[in-house]
Image (cartoon, rainbow, N blue to C red):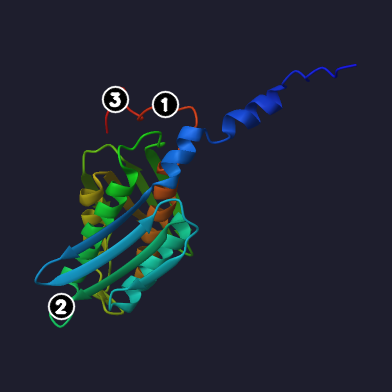
Amino acid sequence: MRAKNPRPTAKTRATASARPTARARSVAANRTASVDRSTRETRVRVKLNLDGTGERKIRTGIGYFDHMLEQLAFHGLLDLELSCEGDLQVDSHHTVEDVGLALGKAIDEALGERTGIRRYGHAYLPMDETLVRVVLDFSGRPEFHFQGAFTRDRIGELETQMVPHFFKSVALAARMTLHMDVLRGENDHHKAEALFKGLARALSDSIVLEPRRAGVSSTKGKL
């Protein structure tokens, strides 16, 4: 006697709908980019996999900046190889800005047509006494807003004024809208680190592939 196929329950239907479709798996398999940016001031090389596990190899010549980029990769589950040879004998400006531009371009290229992504992401990130909010939209319309302040000129060899400038460079090159706010905090190290980790979490959420989304997350049909 042939056994009857069991009728799918709400639980099995929900499980099936949560599985990545063949299209989603195909898109995810190709979400990588390599960028080589050279100027008279810096040379930046980036290899990025958006669907990684947090593996990273970072070398910019600025210890604290390396530490922050490692946080971005680890908490964003990005596989990231990044190196920069810059004119640090001048200051950190060119290095930090060009790393941001190269990383943003790599994100943009890895996303391709942005098919199927959630598009929006946000995170509230605490670090001891500090609390930050990061909200982003891969709209294709680059915009950046930062609200916060640092009390020190530097954290290690990184000029604190370059922290928001780095995020602005990433946002413009990645063609995303990015809002970052330090809601409270006293320690500058905690503020900067919370911002990097907050971006990591918001970014990770926004690039998730929605299995039910056939195209881009816009009624216009393009991002």
Do the CB atoms of the residues marked 2 and 1 lie less than 8 Å apart? no
Using a 10 Å C-alpha cutoff, classify the residue at mark 1 as few (fewer than 14 neighbours), some (14 to 19) or many (20 or more): few
Amino acid beneath label 1: Ala
Q: Against 124, is 43 above or below?
A: below
Q: Is residue 209 left or right of residue 173?
A: right
Give the position of the N terminus as an image quadrant: top right
Q: Is residue 38 left or right of residue 21?
A: left
Q: Against 148, is 64 above or below?
A: below
Q: Compare residues 168 and 113 and report the one nearer the observer.
A: 113
Secondary structure beneath label 3: loop
Q: Which residue is mark 2?
A: 87
Q: Compare residues 74 and 85 and report the one nearer the observer.
A: 85
Secondary structure beneath label 1: loop
Res 97 quadrant in image: bottom left
Secondary structure beneath label 2: loop
Do the CB atoms of the residues marked 1 and 3 lie less than 8 Å apart? no
Q: Position of residue 24 (x, y in %)?
A: 47, 36
Residue 74 in view (yes/no): yes
Separation of marks 2 and 1 at Cα, in angstroms: 46 Å
- Residue at 42%, 40% in the rendered image: 27
Q: How many marks?
A: 3
Separation of marks 2 and 3 at Cα, in angstroms: 43 Å
Mark before the other along the chain sequence, 1 or 3: 1
Amino acid beneath label 2: Asp
Q: Compare residues 47 and 185 and report the one nearer the observer.
A: 47
The furthest residue to the right? 1
Mark before the other along the chain sequence, 2 or 3: 2
Res 223 quadrant in image: top left
Q: Which residue is mark 1?
A: 214
Q: Which residue is mark 3?
A: 221
